[in-house]
Image: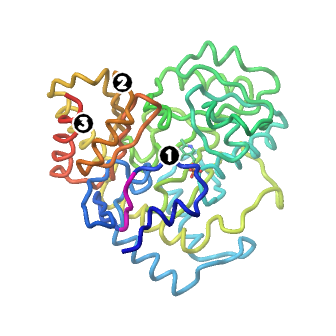
Amino acid sequence: MIDYKALQQQYEIEVYPMRDVVFVKGKGARLWDDQGNEYIDLSAGISVANIGHCNDKVVDAITNQASTLITCANTFYNDKKALFLEKLFSIAPKNMKKAFLTNSGTEAIEGAIKFARYTTKKAKFIAAMKGFHGRTMGALSATFKSEYREGFEPLVPGFTFVPYNNFEKLSEAVDNDTAGIILELVQGEGGINIGKKEYFQNVRKLCDEKGIILIIDEIQTGFCRTGKMFAIEHYDIEADMMTLAKSIAGGFPMGAILCSEKIKMEKSKHGSTFGGNPLACAAGIAAIDFMLKNKLWEQAERKGNYFKEKLSKYALSKVREIRQIGLMIGIELKDKSQPVIVELLKKGIVTLPGGTTVLRLLPPLVISYEELDIAIEKIAEVLV
Ligand SMILES: *Cc1c(COP(=O)(O)O)cnc(C)c1O
């Protein structure tokens, strides 16, 4: 048998903190390794497989499109892109009018930074401590964690960080050269920190008063994860730009920047070779259709509440707090989360870290109650 782990170790540059398993197959909320072991996936590839691994509709869409047209330069019109955009705007907040399509989340953030500068003719940005927006230079400049930034400076100048959910500190950081404010509604990577409604409403007002572009990063919270199609629906505010990616196309790489009428761009000022390619768009149409047909946001809300209620019945001595909105769950531990993640993996449960002490759970939203029950039992065994 081929030692895939050794092979990968030989050739892949070591940027990822690896987990000791080789996944070869997935379906719904299940994964299988190369030894034939079965796992329940509470990570969904970091909130990518919201509609489940190898969703039948997405598999069909990709298969059909692959034999029809795989690539199309963005200077030509394309049937699948037109239909995908129509589908995306059928679910987008009503003030969103135009989109730019990308291949990933970090590219969506990158574009949003450019669009905000171009629109406002101002240079600076404010982002939140513990926020995560990606790894390319612009997005990294908006990302707080020093471990990710160190060794790569100088980053893009003009970024300031303020404590999350603290409006006073944020308003103090604004000046006449502030182009944009970039925030997640629920900080994912930072440990499932849920934004306060009042905070975001104040941020919106401040942006209106000062002519600042409000960029809401829904890359992790979007597409039914928090119990709404988009998390912004919990907040009664409008964004000027929204960045999307992760589960937008059922696991196929894709991202988008949604723009309100405020955003001004001109021909030849931005672009991408692969962004919005026919395969991604076909997968995206199928993914969004599946979410709508199955009212996936309702499932996320019900299953998330069920999970928290049931897990909370155990006397979990290792747990400080459970934070949950839909199926976006952070279990704050009294100690480091890494050993717990390793132990759970041995028990066939795939979980994620969120900061050093948070066990982050982002299961496929199609996970069954039976699978949730098994997962809850195993998690309780490890955390009592
Ligand atoms: C994952 C993530 C990104 C980066 O997306 P990539 O596709 O990995 O580049 C940006 N913002 C948030 C909130 C994310 O969760």
Between 263 and 274, which is closer to the camera in this rendering? 274
Asked whether mark 2 and ligand 1 are closer than 8 Å, the reply comes as: no
Q: Is residue 301 left or right of residue 246?
A: left
Between 80 and 1, which is closer to the camera in this rendering? 1
What residue sits 28% from the left and 59% below the top? 30
Residue type highlighted by circle 1: Pro
Q: Is residue 374 left or right of residue 276?
A: left
Residue type highlighted by circle 2: Asp
- The answer to whether marks 1 and 3 mark residues whose Cβ atoms lie closer than 8 Å is no
Residue neighbourhood size for the residue with mark 2, other residues' Cα within 10 Å, grouped as few (<14), some (14–19), many (≥20): some
| 364 is higher (above) or lower (below) than 329 | below
Quick one: which residue is furthest to the bottom in this view? 67
Please identify, in this view, whether the residue under mark 1 or under mark 3 is nearer the observer: 1
What residue sits 32% from the left and 61% below the top? 293
Horizontal and vertical percent for residue 273? 71, 68
What residue sits 49% from the left and 37% below the top? 189
Name the secondary structure under disc 2. Answer: loop
- The total number of labels drawn is 3
The circle on residue 17 is 1
Identify the magenta region: 20-24
| 160 is higher (above) or lower (below) than 377 | above
Residue neighbourhood size for the residue with mark 3, other residues' Cα within 10 Å, grouped as few (<14), some (14–19), many (≥20): some
Asked whether mark 1 and ligand 1 are closer than 8 Å, the reply comes as: no
Between 160 and 360, which is closer to the camera in this rendering? 360
Asked whether mark 3 and ligand 1 are closer than 8 Å, the reply comes as: no
Q: How is the image coloured?
A: rainbow
Name the secondary structure under disc 3. Answer: helix
Looking at the rendering, which quadrant does residue 21 occupy?
bottom left
The circle on residue 305 is 3
Q: Which residue is mark 2?
A: 335
